[in-house]
Image: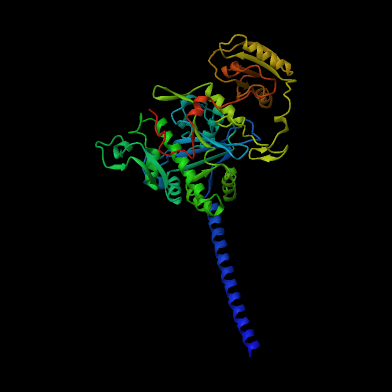
Amino acid sequence: MTGSHNSAAGKRRGSRLRRTAMFGLSFLVLLVAGVGWAYLELNGSIDTFSADGISDNRPPGSSNGQNVLVIGSDSRAGDNSKLGGGEGTVGRSDTAFLLHVYADRKHAVAVSIPRDSLVDIPACKMPGGEWTAPQHDVMFNGAFSVGETAEGNPACTQNTVEQLTGLRVDHTVVIDFAGFSALTSAVGGVPVCLPKDIYQRDLSPKRPTQGARIFAKGPQTVSGQQALDYVRLRHGIGDGSDIGRIKRQQAFVASLIKKVKSRGMNPTTLLPLADAATDAMTVDPGLGSADRLLSFAMSMKNIDLHNTKFVTVPWRYEGSRVAIVEPDADALWAALKADRTVDGQDAGGKGPAEGRETASGPASPAATAPVSGTGISIAVYNGTTVRGLAARATELLRARGFTVTTTANASSQDHASTVIEYGPGLRNEAETTARLFAGARTTASETAGIQVILGSSYAQNPSFAPGTPAPSAVPPTVAAGARSADDDPCADLSYG
């Protein structure tokens, strides 16, 4: 009997174990199926913009860090129309920053570019396929509106940023009001702070009365429509400028990153956030799938909050607009290209092995090879008031085998950075030349040949060894104004 009882009990226990195992397996299958379904759904909701509009005249790719352009669009199309803001259906760039992820994957810096900055917008592709003429000294956010479509023109903004910075943009992400609202709700709200009470008229200056209070002074948590109102708020704080708003936007993104990291950087927590954002997100083809988006997000999991910095490109007021200050801005771009952090560290890491593919394509052995100018003819022009600068550059070039045909003053002496202009078919030769001049930009020209127009950035440090980039550092004024993602969210919230 005992043996029979034990046998029966064993069978019942075995049956329970099998049922328990089957239930657990079924639950696991449902769980995996649910995640798999969410993954497939996420893949289906990612919109990409065409790469046809990206310029052929791009800065060379880097084997070091990555550059990601993030554009906030205030388009009123679709679900965005219910969330307030400006008028009309043309997509406009409300905010933009260039995120540089350093090669060591332990540091990152986001550089805000004011929407009112006066810049040159290169030729951009229109919806009908034709290309515009370049525009000079116009507002930066005008690039996103080229073509006047509801979805905007992210390729044109990317072209403009690449020309402005001399850095290759590896990826571009556009997120509109609806996506932003959903993302802030998905994380359970974002901690922010206001230096004073805010009323309805602060958000809508044309309102005849003060209206109700919409934000109380001090720390609070916002999501959805309230989060949008916070980052759009411009008037009633400081000097009411876009520069002051940038301060609060940087504080908001810092707080959002802190909130996301507190939830854990893993696919389980990131997938719902990505799902919330991607319904209203447009990305370049290189990020156009769920695995690529999640892989990129996971690549930044080792960047701690203190090493996540926010700065603004050096600027000054020029009437009601914003002028970018040189040579400080060029020094900032050169520091990012050299993987120098805001506090002066070399964050280049060991870098990929020779021939290893990076986000910008295969690493090029030519990028580290000695510069040889054999067979390349160049005209050198001094674009500064520093006497003898063209002669010194000519000496440098001839030492590397270049043929210098002309040495003279440029038509104007107010060039901040060095520009290498090249005629048809000479792009590779121009990029070879640019390696001798730290921070130099290359640009296509209808004029035959190659012209080097020296800027004040070269005048300040013309004596570095041929083929070796000049040491780069973030300008002290930029470093002093940097915000870290772990800073007090109530600190430094407005300009003026």
Locate residue 14, reporting x and y percent: 62, 78
The residue nearer to you, when weighing 41 against 186, is 186
Q: Residue furthest top?
A: 387
Which residue occupies 59% across, 27% down?
334
Q: Is residue 440 above or below residue 395?
A: below
Locate residue 457, reporting x and y percent: 58, 19
Residue 304's image quarter? top right
Q: Is residue 465 visible?
A: yes
Which residue occupies 57% across, 49% down?
294
Q: Quadrant of the C terminus?
A: top left
Q: Residue furthest left?
A: 209
Residue 95's image quarter? top left
Residue 206 horizontal side relative to residue 264, left or right: left
The residue nearer to you, when weighing 3 against 60, is 3
Q: Is residue 481 above or below residue 382?
A: below
Locate residue 54, reporting x and y percent: 57, 35
Here the colouring is: rainbow
Q: Is residue 127 visible?
A: no
The residue nearer to you, when weighing 360 against 106, is 106
Q: Residue furthest front?
A: 2
Residue 58 horizontal side relative to residue 254, left or right: right
Locate residue 469, reporting x and y percent: 65, 24
Which residue occupies 61% across, 21% down?
421
Q: How many marks?
A: 0
Residue 57 horizontal side relative to residue 86, left or right: right
Q: Quadrant of the N terminus?
A: bottom right
